[in-house]
Image (spheres, helix red, strand yellow):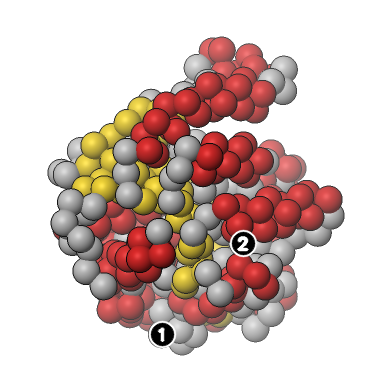
Amino acid sequence: MSVPARRRLLMIEQGGRGGVADYTGELVRALVDIGWTVELATADDHLYPVIPGVVVHRVFHYTRDDSALGRTLRRAHLGPVANGLRFLASLPRLVRLSRDVDIVHSQGWEIPEIGLVAIACMRLGGATIVQTLHGIVERSGRLMRTRRLITRTKGRLTARTIVHAQADLTLLPSGMRVRTAVIPHGEYGGLARTGGSVERAAARAHLGIPAEAPVTLLFGQLRADKGLGDLVAALARLPALHLLVGGQDLGALSALAEQLASPQLAGRVTIREGFLDMGEAAQLFAAADTVALPYPSASQSGVLLLAYGFHRPVIAYPVGGLVEAVIDGETGWLCSRPDVDALVDALAASIEAGAAECLRRGEQGARLADERFSWPVIARRTDEVYGEVLVRV
């Protein structure tokens, strides 16, 4: 469905950095290419490059951990409160922006509860809203029940929902499924190339990793639900393997500090902690033979697409949408089960296969991403969703 002339879109991406921001930058660039006029509401300290045809509004304000005030607030456990209040103060401007466009597209919220408030305010202002849910995972307990209620409520307030995998549909309330479109996560080959060209040997020398050691990389936000514990347990059983970890610690590193410092792992763990730009990421991916995704639950993974963008194969648990994006034996290794024993088997198989086979599977992953997850295809499918919504307005 073609876009009527001069249709205007407000894309909302709150954080201004990280995986969702990378996704948003690629998507808005592709939407401009097919005729949309795009405005982007994001953080005042965002890291977006200049994107021709996109007007950026610095709407959201943060007190981050890289400032003295932010570190003080974090120690006092007041960081979320401060940022929540600053977010609420941004809502009047966000509502004004939402009134001047044909479609508002939300790329998720740092805190789902206040995201619900934002969507409700924009709806009261007359906005037509599409939302993308980048992650729908099964968790138990009161928090998950609260998030399900929020998802259900947002589904009623928004005109259409987008998810990245067929597996996500089964996790949505039944009433939302008929208004939900599955659009795969786009490829990150272009994003990877912004990190520059890095040779494997040079990257390993820079990081202090032995030239011939088999290396697996865990990259991204280091949360407890990203499987670092399973990977460290597997590492203890594979004495030839070197573990490379890169990303901002959100609890996983600190929780595993004792195990990571054990004599059994001495000299076999390299950690680059903090927010890493694409140049730093390029060093880590160049040094790795494989990229580990031992997620106990997942929708889809930007890290998986980034691994393909860097021509690296993945070792993944067979959960959620990961199964839809990994061809076992071609673009990586799918574990037989989501547990440590199966992870050890897959890692051992990658070690036995050797660097040349890892490289072959990485090249296959890059080709798969180019064929199945190209941004022009993602943008056209997103455009179709917008068109279906506008016909009904």
Residue 156 on image: x %, y %: 61, 57
Distance from the alpha carbon under mark 1 to that under mark 2: 27 Å
* Three-letter residue code for mark 2: Ile
Q: Residue at x 56, y 12 (%)?
A: 69
Would you say 49 lies left or right of 388 here? Answer: left
Q: How many labels, in total?
A: 2
> Earlier along the polypeptide chain: callout 1 or callout 2?
2
Occupied quadrant, residue 88: top right
Q: Amino acid at mark 1?
A: Glu
The residue located at (47%, 71%) in the rendering is: 181
Q: Nearer the viewer's eye, disc 1 or disc 2? A: 2
Residue at 48%, 55% in the rendered image: 131
Labels 1 & 2 near each other (Cβ < 8 A): no
Mark 1 surroundings: few (<14), some (14-19) or many (≥20) residues within 10 A: some
Among all residues in the image, which is located at the extreme front?
Answer: 393
Q: Depth check: 365 or 88 in front?
A: 88
The residue indicated by pointer 1 is 330
Residue 347: percent from left, percent from top: 57, 73
List x then y, in percent, for residue 257. 70, 41
Q: Please give the name of the residue rendered at 42% of the width and 70% of the height, measured from the top-left corner.
A: 183
- Residue 137 can be seen in this image: yes
Q: Which residue is mark 2?
A: 136
Q: Nearer the viewer, residue 299 or 218?
A: 299
In this picture, residue 198 sits left or right of residue 44: left
**With 22 as the anchor, is 169 left or right in this view?**
right
For the C terminus, the quadrant is bottom left
The disc at residue 278 is none
Question: Do we see residue 232 in this rendering?
Answer: no
x then y, percent, for residue 339: 72, 72
- Label 2: state its secondary structure: loop
Question: Which sits in the foreground, 283 or 151?
Answer: 151
